[in-house]
Image (cartoon, helix red, strand yellow):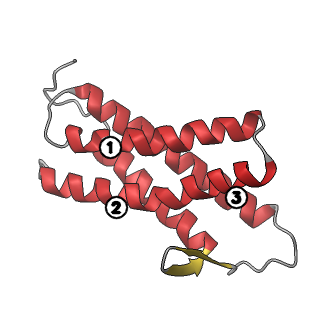
Amino acid sequence: MRLRPMLLVSWTILSIACSFPILAMVLGAAAWGGVNIALGIYLFLATGGIVGLLAGFFAAFSRKVLFAWVTCASAIAVAGLSAIFAGAFLFDRDGSVPLNDPISFGSVHAPILVFYSLALVCSCVEALLYFPKARKMQAL
């Protein structure tokens, strides 16, 4: 079964939109506490992940495997960051911060775990959709 390119593009748009809160939180942490080596890696993965997800627009219509690999790797990077942040929030938060601690991102007000979960799920599905399959794709 071949997925329609417009479905892939729609999912790419959703994944990019869900990964922006992760980038905003990494940038906020860097601005608040400075940049060390771990946060530098997070910054690299977050910005590279969002820029790499833009390759999904080309991968949906192209048969070249390079775009699919870049999109898949970027989605895995964003999913990994989402899982790291969700785990840190669940297990390393102060006891006075409730699990349903709300955060505002634009006009959207939701618990912070909702943003992490959406980014994780959307990025995992994006990685599965763009994982280069054993179909006839050109190498470069």
Q: What is the crowding at mark 2: few (fewer than 14 residues within 10 Å), some, or many (at least 20)?
A: some
Per the image, the residue denoted by label 2 is 14
Left or right: 88 as drawn, with respect to 6: right
Q: Earlier in the sequence, mark 3 or mark 2?
A: 2
Q: Is residue 61 left or right of residue 95?
A: left
State which quadrant residue 73 falls in: top left
Q: Quadrant of the C terminus?
A: top left
Viewer-nearest residue: 132 or 106: 106
Query: What residue is drawn where x is 62% and y is 72%?
Result: 112
Q: Which secondary structure, mark 2? A: helix
Residue of label 1? 54
Location of residue 72 in the rendering, given as x and y in whole percent from the top left corner: 38, 39
Instruction: Confirm whether residue 120 shows in the render.
Output: no
The residue that appears at 54% across and 68% down in the rendered structure is 115
Disc 1 marks a residue whose amino acid type is: Leu
The image's mark for residue 87 is 3
x then y, percent, for residue 3: 15, 51
Pick whichever, 123 or 43, lies toward us.
Answer: 43
Q: Nearer the viewer, mark 3 or mark 1?
A: 1
Q: Secondary structure at mark 3?
A: helix
The residue most toward the top is 140
Quarter of the image where one finds residue 64: top left
88 relative to 108, above or below: above
- The answer for how far apart the CA atoms under marks 2 and 1 are is 11 Å
